[in-house]
Image (spheres, rainbow, N blue to C red):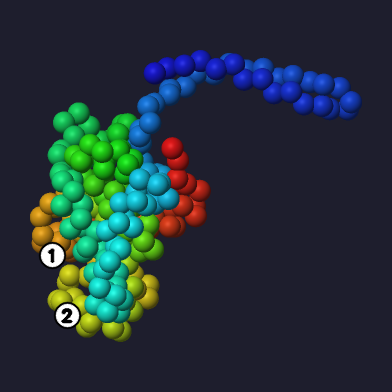
Amino acid sequence: RAVQADVRLTYRHKNRTRIEKATTSFFVYRSGAISWDDTRAAAAFVTPNDPVVDGFARAVVQGRDQAFEGGPLRNVMTAMRLFNALSGYGITYVPDPNTPFSAVSDTKSAVDQVQYPRGLLASRTGDCDDMSVLYCTVLENVGIPTAFLDGPGHILMMFDSGIHPRNALALSVDENLYVVQGDRVWIPVETTMIGKSFLDAWAEGASIWQRWQSSSDFHVTPVEAAWAGGVHEVG
């Protein structure tokens, strides 16, 4: 909604108190509003320290098989466990009928709505940006770095496998199924497929990455870099 504000600045200059006044108008949006002119803003919705998120993620990873999940595939196995837990919890992809990402992402001034992770855990339904934010959040909670991938009409994510490229053979998968960024192997995941097989979501994420490689509208936004750049957790 449009609001009007009276701004007053009081300061001292040469031992005199001075007051400057101005009037301005601006819009106030409800919680969760975002415009996609800068994907780094999505990192503000990644809230790994939220007690609701922490309780969910920690409950999932407790009791895991340390001998199986504590080695070089720790991040991959933990990501799979959390993906399957969100599926079992009933998180379901539902396109936003009012502001689908495919529409608002093309109009940078348009205002979209993103659910905070605790909200999605309560509603259990969300669109592609909601699902990507939630999955990034639970992974960040357990120490797995994540990044957003946005391209023509869609957004998904990838996570750091914790594996150095020279050890990529440990994954035992085709090299088209992972991404090398710096000194780490990253795994793209199509989060709208939460509720289905993790391996299918991984394969679809990798397929989208391959298709987007030549697109000028394709961006990779590491969550931790976005936080460091001045985009922080809110709300």
What x and y, as percent, mark residue 59? 30, 56
Can you tell which quarter of the image residue 34 is in?
A: top left
Which residue shows up at 35% across the image and 45% down it? Answer: 52
The residue under label 2 is 172
What x and y, as percent, mark residue 63? 28, 66
> Is 106 positioned to the left or the right of 30 in the image?
left
Mark 1 belongs to which amino acid?
Answer: Leu
What x and y, as percent, mark residue 173? 15, 76
Which residue shows up at 43% across the image and 24% down it? Answer: 28
Note whether 123 is above or below 181 in the view shown: above
> Is 36 positioned to the left or the right of 124 in the image?
right
Q: Quadrant of the N terminus?
A: top left
Q: Secondary structure under badge 1?
A: helix
Q: Can you name the residue that lies furthest to the front here?
A: 63
Note whether 137 is above or below 108 in the view shown: below
The residue under label 1 is 199
Residue at mark 2 to residue at mark 1: CA–CA distance = 13 Å
Which residue shows up at 29% across the image and 62% down it? Answer: 61
Q: Secondary structure under badge 2?
A: loop
Specify the label residue 159 is tagged with.
none
Q: Earlier in the sequence, mark 2 or mark 1?
A: 2
Mark 2 belongs to which amino acid?
Answer: Ser
Residue 77 visible here: yes
> Is 219 positioned to the left or the right of 211 in the image?
right
Which residue shows up at 35% across the image and 34% down it? Answer: 32
Q: Quadrant of the C terminus?
A: top left
> Is 33 positioned to the left or the right of 11 in the image?
left
Residue toward you, 167 or 35 = 167
| Crowdedness near tag 2: few (<14), some (14–19) or many (≥20) residues, C-alpha within 10 Å | few
